[in-house]
Image (spheres, helix red, strand yellow):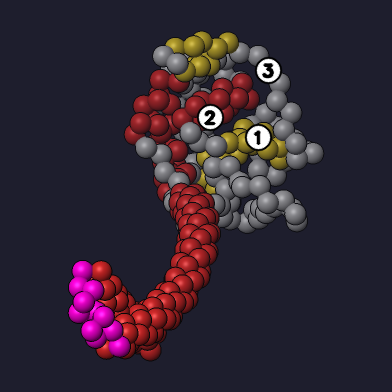
Amino acid sequence: MTALDSSSLEFWELVGLWGFIFVWVGVAGEGAEIFTKLLLPKVYRARHRCFDVIGAFFWIVLVVALAVEFIGNVKAMQITDRENARLNSEAGQARKDAGEAIEQAALASLRTASVEATNLVLRAKVVELELKLQPRRITMEQVRKFMFLTEKVEKVPIKILITAEGRDTETFAHDLREMFTYAGFRTNSDVGVFGVNRRPEVVSGMKFGITNELPDVFFVMYDTGGVSRIKGSWRLERTNGLVRPIISETNELAVFIGLSQCFDQIGVRSEWHGDDKMVTPGECLIWVPVK
């Protein structure tokens, strides 16, 4: 309610109140006249003109007071109705604004949830990328598991080759050599520093359009078509939840096939590759590509 409406309401309520008061004044005057006429007829007859004037005066006061009270009450009611309508309108607008605010809050909550979900996906991808960028290493737990897996595999000489030096190529190749040594495998006769062979003149790369991630190692066998054709048979045994190959022959291909199965079980990713430049017929080796 504005200050003007408040003042007007107070004024018309006061007008109605004074009208109400003068109504009772008029009623009292009229009542006195009637009382005198009924109970004091001699006095009334002796001064009837005076009483008629007084009665007429109080009748006018009563009529005017009733009119004033009516007008005051009507004006006050109009102001009150107008204020109630304004308050109802403001309440309706407030409810509408509250509904819109709730809707906006819900949308903001959804957007926040969407951003958080996107952030979680991005963080997961960052963690995945960080793991991929971590240098390849062989842990002692992997060494112990590999020693157990290859316990019944013929310990032939193992040749490990790197063709280009990467950020972890030398270290990972040396880790592999140490793991094979702990497992009892022999070293090839033409081995280089750290028990690793090096051929930096050999250049390798991936064909255009191929985006698959390279494995940790390649098991390389002799093949002129670049495709490995693996043939052979061997026995397996399941022990302590692991599958161990049993290979007693000195055939390098059979041994390397068994080693590839062991690598899969210790978490070293491997693939087979056929090549006629890195190996000679009947020879196999483990090639550590650049990460």
Task: Please tell me which residue lies in front, 1 or 67.
Answer: 67
Task: Please tell me which residue lies in front, 14 or 94.
Answer: 14
Whole-number angstrom distance, CA of label 1 to CA of label 3: 15 Å
Task: From the top left corner, tell me how far across and down residue 93 is, in percent.
Answer: 51, 69
Camera-near label (1 vs 2) is 2
> Who comes first in sequence, dot 1 or dot 3?
3
Task: From the top left corner, tell me how far across and down residue 270 is, in percent.
Answer: 58, 36
Q: Residue 22: in sight, yes or no?
A: no
Q: Label 1 is placed on what type of residue?
A: Trp
Give the class, few, some or many, for how many residues have Cα within 10 Å of label 2's Cα (few <14, many ≥20). few
Task: From the top left corner, tell me how far across and down residue 27 is, in percent.
Answer: 29, 74
- Mark number for residue 232? 3
> Who comes first in sequence, dot 3 or dot 2?
3
Main secondary structure of the magenta stretch? helix
Camera-near label (3 vs 2) is 2
Q: Residue at x 24, y 86 (%)?
A: 47
**Magenta residue span:** 39-49
Q: Residue at x 50, y 16 (%)?
A: 243
Q: Label 3 is placed on what type of residue?
A: Gly
- Mark number for residue 211? none
Quarter holding the N terminus?
bottom left
Whole-number angstrom distance, CA of label 3 to CA of label 2: 19 Å
Looking at the image, the residue that sits furthest to the right is 225
Q: From the viewer's perspective, tell me whether residue 286 is left or right of residue 88.
A: right
Q: Label 2 is placed on what type of residue?
A: Asp
The residue labelled by disc 2 is 264
> Who comes first in sequence, dot 1 or dot 2?
2
Q: Residue 221: in sight, yes or no?
A: yes
Q: Residue at x 72, y 40 (%)?
A: 276
The residue labelled by disc 1 is 272
Task: Please tell me which residue lies in front, 21 or 14.
Answer: 21
Q: Residue at x 56, y 52 (%)?
A: 290
